[in-house]
Amino acid sequence: MRRNRFVTLLLAVLALVGAALLVPSGTASAAGPCDNASNWTAGTWYPAGTVVRYTDGKYYVAEHDNPGYDPLISTWYWDPYTCQGGGTPGAGKFPVTEAQFQQMFPGRNAFYTYNGLIAALAAYPGFAGTGSDQVRRQEAAAFLANVDHETGGLVHIVEQNTANYPHYCDGNQPYGCPAGQAAYYGRGPLQLSWNFNYKAAGDALGINLLNNPSLVQTDAAVSWKTALWYWNTQRGPGTMTPHDAMVNSRGFGETIRSINGAVECDGRNPAQVQSRVNSYQRFAQMLGTAPGGNLYC
């Protein structure tokens, strides 16, 4: 009788272990920012990207490192954080884990932190949080693939061709170029450039980037936010935003057109297009999703 009970218990344990081993890595069961959120405590050090649960039951993400400032008072340091699905902890979390991010960008510049990206997500909660799980993963992969191409694998913070720097000042704009003629060169994950883009991005994000464009190369959260601003709100030379292209099944090729279509699409530079597509296919595979159709422009 004792032996039978022991065997029964052993079989039950083995079944539980086997079930755990069958859970694939990178699935929705992985803990997300809201799953790991602790209750905010005054005086506790919070690095940028930390998500906390405030006393009102809502979530906030640290946009900048801070020593436990109150999220409702120190709004420069904190942004509201939306856990999609009615605020349920863990629902709608960003579909790229920190481990996957590091795998995608093994040689990245230390400036481009995962926490900086997570902190920036609060500005555009619809990004990689709209549609099915597959669509969310595809959009995350598409965004990061274009980032990979624009920055050489998240290595470059600023545009490398310094000869182009004076060309990004549109003097026809009424506000001109108060930071200097050569101050609006490409910076950040999507290489934000031109004075009018710094003005528009700054206005949308509540940051004076027209007068302080260097913030895009010194503040990781701001840098990621400018890339998300472009991705979610700008059509560029295309007909839709990259976000709309991915959530409306128009394909990765349309994101290329919106970012640099005038230079690369319609046969202008197929090698550059192929480089972006290669990154997208690789990242989609890492995230366990099919890349979908319409990959080229």
Image (cartoon, rainbow, N blue to C red):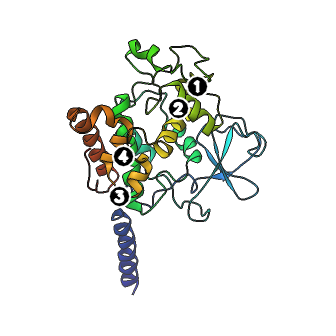
Identify the image quadrant of the C terminus. Answer: top left
Q: Which residue is mark 4?
A: 142
The nearer-to-camera label among 3 and 1 is 3
SS category of the residue bearing label 4 = helix
Tell me which residue sits at (33%, 47%) in the image: 254
Tell me which residue sits at (44%, 33%) in the image: 189
First reached walking from the N terminus: tag 4 or tag 3:
4
Task: Determine whether, in the image, residue 196 is placed left or right of residue 251.
Answer: right
Determine whether label 4 and label 1 are within 8 Å by CB.
no
Whole-number angstrom distance, CA of label 1 to CA of label 2: 7 Å
How would you rate the neighbour count of disc 1 (Cα within 10 Å): few for under 14, some for 14-19, many for 20 or more? some
Whole-number angstrom distance, CA of label 2 to CA of label 3: 27 Å
For residue 182, above or below residue 293: above
How would you rate the neighbour count of disc 2 (Cα within 10 Å): few for under 14, some for 14-19, many for 20 or more? many
Is residue 279 visible in the rendered structure shown here? yes
Determine whether label 1 and label 2 are within 8 Å by CB.
yes
Whole-number angstrom distance, CA of label 4 to CA of label 3: 12 Å
Determine whether label 4 and label 3 are within 8 Å by CB.
no
Q: Quadrant of residue 148?
A: top left
Is residue 47 visible in the rendered structure shown here? no
* Numbered badge on residue 182: none
Q: Which residue is mark 3?
A: 249
Whole-number angstrom distance, CA of label 3 to CA of label 1: 34 Å
Whole-number angstrom distance, CA of label 4 to CA of label 1: 25 Å
First reached walking from the N terminus: tag 3 or tag 1:
1
State the residue in front, 21 or 74: 74
Q: Which residue is mark 1?
A: 215
Where is residue 183? Give x, y as percent.
Answer: 53, 17
How would you rate the neighbour count of disc 3 (Cα within 10 Å): few for under 14, some for 14-19, many for 20 or more? some
Where is residue 73? Give x, y as percent.
Answer: 79, 42
First reached walking from the N terminus: tag 2 or tag 3:
2
First reached walking from the N terminus: tag 2 or tag 4:
4
